[in-house]
Image (cartoon, rainbow, N blue to C red):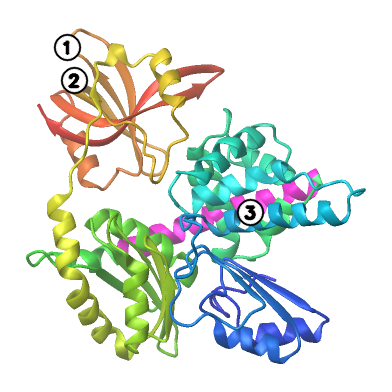
């Protein structure tokens, strides 16, 4: 059962619990939710069901009275695995369950849990948890499984995403993950789970095509909403430093897309950001994204404890809230009071660490191969950042929806193709377009580019300056 994020919100609700039990459910397992849903779990227990919570979100108050609450972020947890995403928690629970079953049912064939690591890797990357410790192992092994195309669902998504190369964390985060999420954002929330569970290639292809269409619709809606949100944010940022936390709101915004808006606003404003979609009754569904070093989940829990929001929760880098329009001003003031010192300190300390300097001719496939041995890269384990000093920006032009394709030439004549993702209409994009033909310093990372069966090195630009 997947709650509709628009009509039911996130996580379990008492009505859904009672409905499941009326249809015969004896055991309810909540996944990626439940830790802060005491009322809903009480309703399930009172109706006669057992409840097990498998979650990773921060705890905001007393634990629910469930049969078990498995959460590495419980205050009494000593595992040191608080960086797991919910799928990682579920996988480790399944490992332990399988171990117990083997001791009791020695003749039964054990489940092949390792074959499911592609799904664990997908969730780990898309939830932007640190790729350290066991998370790194999940992704390394999960990518190996994903590249074997055992999952009909992932194979179908790879086809509609036009992935013509070995699947990487980039594909999981920016091509496959968004398509799975598109169903829950603006369509049927169950489409993604049905796709990943099916063994029927025909059904997988049909669902994947539907999700691809929904993702295109989501992208168009996001562009329209983002333009409005950025206008509001820029107005707030125009005076001095602006607010420590950007809070934007819209009456006509789709609540399934506010998380994406918050992420884009966070990058644009270089500070935590919330986007809130209000309904006709004046109740807003909001989502927030944070910058490294600022715990947004804790701030939201404090706002809930202060009675400033209807409900809310999350973790360090992301949070969700439900708030009444009448309380939005007080919430903004609370955020400013509690966050300003830390956020502006983090901005003052912000810097881009450079791991090394290269010339275009030094960016070889052998170097890329050596770097990839240290991967996969992602949150908590970022790819090495290189500077290409004093390179001539021979070309810069928009490609795709809002990316920029560039070419750089070293002082000795070496050339390298480069790309700046989502850079159109950003300060970086304006810089690249304005300085075509000039000598610049650029910073970024190396990646492989596959085209017509050939693999070449390309440079992903993240920052640039005049030489």
Q: Is residue 186 above or below residue 402?
A: below
The residues tagged by marks 1 and 3 sit, at their Cα atoms, a distance apart of 53 Å
Under circle 2, the secondary element is strand
Residue 138 on image: x %, y %: 57, 43
Q: Nearer the viewer, residue 164 or 130?
A: 130
Which residue appears farthest toward the left when viewing the image? Answer: 240
Quarter of the C terminus within the rendering: top left
Q: Residues within 10 Å of mark 3 (few under 14, many from 20)?
A: few
Q: Nearer the viewer, residue 306 or 325?
A: 306
Badge 3 is on which residue? 92
Residue for point 30% across, 65% down: 273
Badge 1 is on which residue? 411
Residue 124 on image: x %, y %: 53, 50
Q: Is residue 127 above or below residue 151?
A: below
- On residue 391, which mark appears? 2
The residues tagged by marks 2 and 1 sit, at their Cα atoms, a distance apart of 6 Å
Residue 388 part of the magenta-drawn span: no
Q: Main secondary structure of the magenta part?
A: helix
Under circle 1, the secondary element is loop
Under circle 3, the secondary element is helix
Residue for point 33% across, 69% down: 274
Left or right: 344 with respect to 370?
left
Q: Do the residues under discs 1 and 3 have CB atoms within 8 angstroms? A: no
Q: Earlier in the sequence, mark 2 or mark 1?
A: 2
Residue 203 part of the magenta-drawn span: yes
Which region shows up in magenta?
201-227
């Amino acid at each position: 059962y997947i709650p509709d994020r628009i009509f039911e919100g996130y996580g379990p609700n008492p009505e859904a619990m009672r409905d499941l039990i009326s249809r015969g459910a004896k055991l309810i397992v909540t996944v990626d939710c439940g830790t802060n849903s005491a009322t809903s779990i009480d309703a399930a227990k009172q109706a006669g069901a057992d409840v097990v919570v498998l979650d990773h979100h921060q705890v905001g108050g007393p634990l629910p009275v469930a049969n078990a609450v498995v959460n590495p972020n419980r205050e009494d947890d000593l595992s040191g695995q608080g960086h797991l995403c919910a799928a990682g928690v579920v996988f480790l629970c399944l490992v332990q369950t399988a171990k117990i079953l083997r001791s009791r049912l020695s003749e039964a064939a054990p489940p092949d849990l390792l074959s499911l690591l592609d799904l664990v890797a997908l969730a780990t990357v898309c939830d932007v948890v640190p790729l350290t410790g066991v998370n790194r192992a999940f992704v390394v092994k999960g990518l190996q499984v994903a590249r074997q195309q055992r999952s009909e669902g992932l194979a179908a998504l790879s086809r509609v995403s036009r992935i013509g190369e070995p699947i990487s964390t980039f594909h999981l985060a920016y091509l496959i993950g968004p398509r799975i999420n598109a169903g829950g954002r603006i369509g049927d929330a169950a489409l993604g789970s049905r796709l990943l569970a099916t063994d029927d290639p025909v059904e997988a292809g049909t669902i994947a095509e539907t999700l691809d269409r929904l993702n295109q619709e989501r992208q168009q809606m996001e562009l329209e909403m983002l333009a409005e949100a950025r206008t509001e944010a820029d107005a707030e940022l125009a005076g001095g430093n602006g607010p420590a936390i950007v809070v934007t709101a819209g009456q006509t915004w789709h609540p399934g897309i506010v998380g994406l808006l918050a992420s884009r606003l966070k990058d644009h404003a270089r500070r935590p950001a919330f986007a809130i979609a209000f309904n006709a009754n004046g109740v807003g569904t909001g989502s927030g994204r944070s910058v490294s070093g600022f715990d947004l989940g804790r701030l939201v829990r404090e706002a809930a404890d202060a009675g400033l929001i209807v409900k809310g929760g999350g973790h360090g880098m992301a949070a969700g809230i439900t708030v009444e329009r009448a309380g939005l001003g007080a919430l903004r003031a609370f955020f400013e009071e509690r966050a300003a010192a830390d956020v502006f300190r983090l901005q003052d300390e912000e810097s881009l660490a450079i791991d090394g300097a290269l010339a275009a001719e030094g960016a070889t496939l052998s170097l890329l191969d050596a770097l990839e041995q240290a991967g996969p890269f992602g949150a908590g384990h970022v790819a090495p950042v290189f500077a290409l000093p004093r390179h001539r920006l021979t070309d810069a032009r928009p490609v795709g929806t809002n990316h920029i394709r560039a070419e750089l030439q070293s002082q000795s004549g070496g050339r390298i193709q480069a790309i700046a993702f989502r850079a159109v209409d950003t300060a970086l994009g304006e810089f690249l377009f304005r300085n075509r033909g000039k000598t610049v310093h650029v910073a970024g990372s190396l990646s492989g580019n596959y085209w017509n069966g050939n693999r070449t090195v390309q440079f992903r630009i993240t920052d640039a300056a005049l030489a």
